[in-house]
Amino acid sequence: MTVTAPKGSTGGGCRRGSKESGQPDLALVVNEGPRRAAAGVFTANRVKAAPVLWSQQVLRGGEVSAVVLNSGGANACTGPKGFQDTHATAERAAAALGHSAAEIAVASTGLIGTYLPMDRLLPGIDKAAAELSPHGGERAAIAIRTTDTVHKTAVRAGEGWSVGGMAKGAGMLAPGLATLLVVLTTDADLAPPVLDKAVRDAVRTTFERVDSDGCMSTNDTVLLLASGASGGDPGYEEFADVLREVCEDLARKLIGDAEGASKDIRIEVIHAATEDDAVEVGRTIARNNLLKCAIHGEDPNWGRVLSAIGTTKAVFEPERLNVAINGVWVCREGSAGDGRDLVDMRFREVRITADLDAGTHSAVIWANDLTAEYVHENSAYSS
Amino acid sequence: MTVTAPKGSTGGGCRRGSKESGQPDLALVVNEGPRRAAAGVFTANRVKAAPVLWSQQVLRGGEVSAVVLNSGGANACTGPKGFQDTHATAERAAAALGHSAAEIAVASTGLIGTYLPMDRLLPGIDKAAAELSPHGGERAAIAIRTTDTVHKTAVRAGEGWSVGGMAKGAGMLAPGLATLLVVLTTDADLAPPVLDKAVRDAVRTTFERVDSDGCMSTNDTVLLLASGASGGDPGYEEFADVLREVCEDLARKLIGDAEGASKDIRIEVIHAATEDDAVEVGRTIARNNLLKCAIHGEDPNWGRVLSAIGTTKAVFEPERLNVAINGVWVCREGSAGDGRDLVDMRFREVRITADLDAGTHSAVIWANDLTAEYVHENSAYSS
């Protein structure tokens, strides 16, 4: 059920002691080959963590032998020393695995602005490398958690090949990407340019459409490693479909475990003039704090949906907007529609449909409600 | 201390019974002349309430005799009937005051998507008109409150003339404008084009720089009525300065009374390449939920400031960013600076300084923290 499901991948996770909880905090995922093709997508935040800057360089070569991931520290806003620490991390993994550091990607998550405890991290890499296993994916997925209450994994099979994945991310979760670390593996035999296109396409309509709290991270990283160990070479469409399914599954799990959330909100924007319009309107609805509070209170407050739509540049006429909440069209043509009391909002999933009546395009954005627990989790301690 | 401080203005407020609390909910501000020059600024939300659409038409004539304001219902997303209700409101006030309805502005605030209780509102107008007084400004300011815990008024004197104002707004409070109703009066003798320029200039650097919760209202209205009753004709600069001071005072009071807030956050962006850059960065910091939570928790989490800045298009280099919280430069050149433990955050006002090191421009944005009380106020009932 995870990154070690496809052939040619091994993984592991261990404790190196950076977390007060004593939970595992270091993960290693290794591509055992025969191929070591890779692709990746990184945060659009202009303030990028050291491991993001490093891994972007590594990806330029199109080959990745292994990924070292640590939780308990983002290594962001740490200057030249932070970059040296990432470099040392890659060198240590390279030595332990017998590869070149130029093929070792690094990903970090945790508090911004503090240095990593290298004295504990480096020995942890040796330990994780010594314990690598074709069944170690679960341990890797557990070790990358921060405020995640569960670890997130997914796997899908193609014909003779498969795709596995793991993800973390529970706060600072918004497009471009979500604040997340994702490692995807496959034993399909594909070249870096194909992987690159597939991972960008998959991310664009999955992780990029998750907006838990509107906050974009400095560390977001999605990596796809292809070992070619199955010998199978699926066509692009077939591979892209399966990869997208794995990403969709992981993205949905991120929303389902977002910090403090009591509701998962599926926002579908329909009849938009363009897909960009649909996405813009969906994200704007997703980020409206007042609406997020109303959903938490199980109040079908469609006025807050309209006031959010009104702040976008999308093509629409106010008097032609329709909004449904859990299937009840509470707003028709810009005014009150069917009765608010018909809307049943007791369940965790809440569906909002915004009909712009301006075209044929649509998009789905996933968000969460805003709760006192979210405030507590993000005010009671630094993260 | 309010809209009836300048000569030539009368006001009043009364109960018409739309609020469960039994609080006053209808206000009237009348320009008794001799001049009835006016100007106004309205929400940039494309979903505009009926009274906004009406008052925009009225303002085109450059003259306003009176403003009718109701709380307890926004009359937004109410279609043709909503507009007819606003028209009827203006007609009733015109009849009661002996003016033309084309000179009566209307402003509403409250829940979006429901019709106003016209059977109670119209008699309320007669009552408010009958009780108009040169000392009625305080009652008017009280009657426009929604979730405001205090009424907000301000007054400043020029040489032989003065400016008075009242404001409401506690949630859905963000630029373009804040969710607010503001009425400003003056007895200075100025023509509509001068008033228009002055009110736009004043709003741009006061109400437009308040961002409590990132949510833009459908009803924001700022009106300036000039009676000319003092006979004084100050120059533009002199008048604009005083008007700006009144707006600044009111804007500061709005932030100080924002829903559920425990902190007022003054975000100053300095050394920006342009004023637009400074404003964009300030607003982006102001809207970052994670940072707002951290401030609530008295955690000087400068990493969240940098991650917010990184999502903007402003000119800056990550390794040249500096951030101070309450005067302590906790981030220098993109990395950890002086000790976080030096920052004292016990008081209500928190000052964040973001130094972009990219130019000579600056801007101040005011925001609030994010609290469990905000969530409660906006989830426990419809508003």
Image (cartoon, coloured by chain):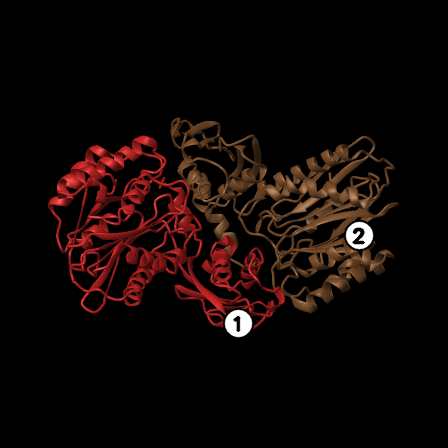
Chain colours: A red, B brown
Q: Camera-side residue: B240 or B187? A: B240
Is A344 placed left or right of A165 in the picture? right
Is A205 placed left or right of B199 in the picture? left
Q: Secondary structure at mark 2?
A: strand
Q: CA distance from mark 1 to mark 2?
A: 38 Å
Task: Count neighbours of disc 1 (C-alpha within 10 A) and say few if under 14, some if 14 to 19, many if 20 or more.
Answer: many
Q: Position of residue A152 (x, y in %)?
A: 27, 56
Disc number for residue B66: 2
Q: Secondary structure at mark 1?
A: strand
Disc number for residue B118: none
Q: Camera-side residue: A25 or B271? A: B271
Asked whether disc 1 touches disc 2, contact meaning CB atoms under 8 Å apart, the reply is: no
At 59% from the left edge and 41% from the top edge, which residue is drawn? B209
Q: Position of residue A223 (x, y in %)?
A: 28, 51
Q: Camera-side residue: B59 or B22? A: B59
Q: Is residue B353 above or below residue B52?
A: above
Q: Which residue is mark 1?
A: A329
